[in-house]
Every structure is written in structure tokens, then in C-alpha cells.
Amino acid sequence: MAKYESRLHGDFDAVLDRLEQGILAGSMSASYEDGSDYESGNFRCAVRVYERYSFLGGNRVSLSMTLMGEGEELFLSGITSGGSQAIFLKMNTFGEETFLDTLVELVQAYQTETRWDG
């Protein structure tokens, strides 16, 4: 399992849309599995689960992404899982790390821009 978290500032919908599109475009085997949205007052939370095939690891891995925020103050959490082929030990996590790198690179691109406006 690999995890990445970051605080962001911007429009919730624009950030979510850009991350979703970037994750799906990051691998030809990436797919959207399911998601959930919650809103209460000015607070919003979106949970997304993606899956892709790891050619290097020869298995499937998942990425759970949670974007939450109030107004333009946002918090992102991405956690990958799967991919290990061992029974008792966690081995061969290349696919998880590579899938998470897609999210990290998208966030880094966001941070070098002034702001995503959709």
C-alpha cells in the first residue's frame, strides 16, 4: 500500500474533474470503478476508486482518491492497494507506486499552475 496526501487551494469541481481525467488518461487500462459524493453546507467530499492493470507487476491495482474541502481549502488523499502476489508478505508493490505516481504528478502540475479553472 502506498499513500499520498496534500493540501490544495482551488475550485473543488475543477480540481476533481482534472484529477479524474488525468488518472484515467494516465494508463490505457485505467478504469473508474465507483465513487461517492457528500455535501453539507459548504463542506464537500468526493471519494473515487480506480483500477488498472500493472504490466510490470502482472496484476491489477486500485487507487482510492478522496478530495474534501470547505470553500477553496481542499485536502486530497490517495491510497493504492493490491498488486502483491505473495501470500503472507507484501511483495511487488511496483504497480501500486506507479499508479500513485500518476496522482502525485497531477498534483505537482496543479501546484506549478496558479489555479485550475476548469
Image (cartoon, grey):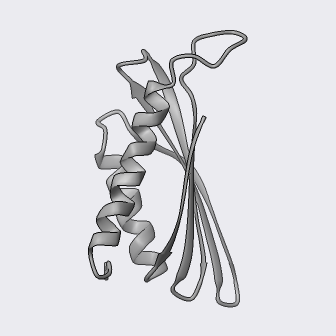
Q: Is residue 5 above or below residue 88?
A: below
- Which residue occupies 31% across, 38% down? 27
Q: In this view, does 45 lie above or below 57?
A: below
Residue 24 image point, x, y percent = 35, 48
- Which residue occupies 44% across, 28% down? 95
Residue 96 image point, x, y percent = 49, 33
- Which residue occupies 60% across, 78% down? 69
Q: Quadrant of the N terminus?
A: top right
Question: Is 28 on the left-hand or right-hand side of 83?
Answer: left
Q: In this view, does 84 lie above or below 96?
A: above
- Which residue occupies 45% across, 76% down? 13
Q: Which quarter of the picture shows residue 35?
A: bottom right
Q: How many marks?
A: 0
Q: Is residue 53 above or below residue 67?
A: above
Q: In which quarter of the image is the C terminus?
A: bottom left
Residue 15 image point, x, y percent = 41, 72
Residue 60 image point, x, y percent = 49, 25
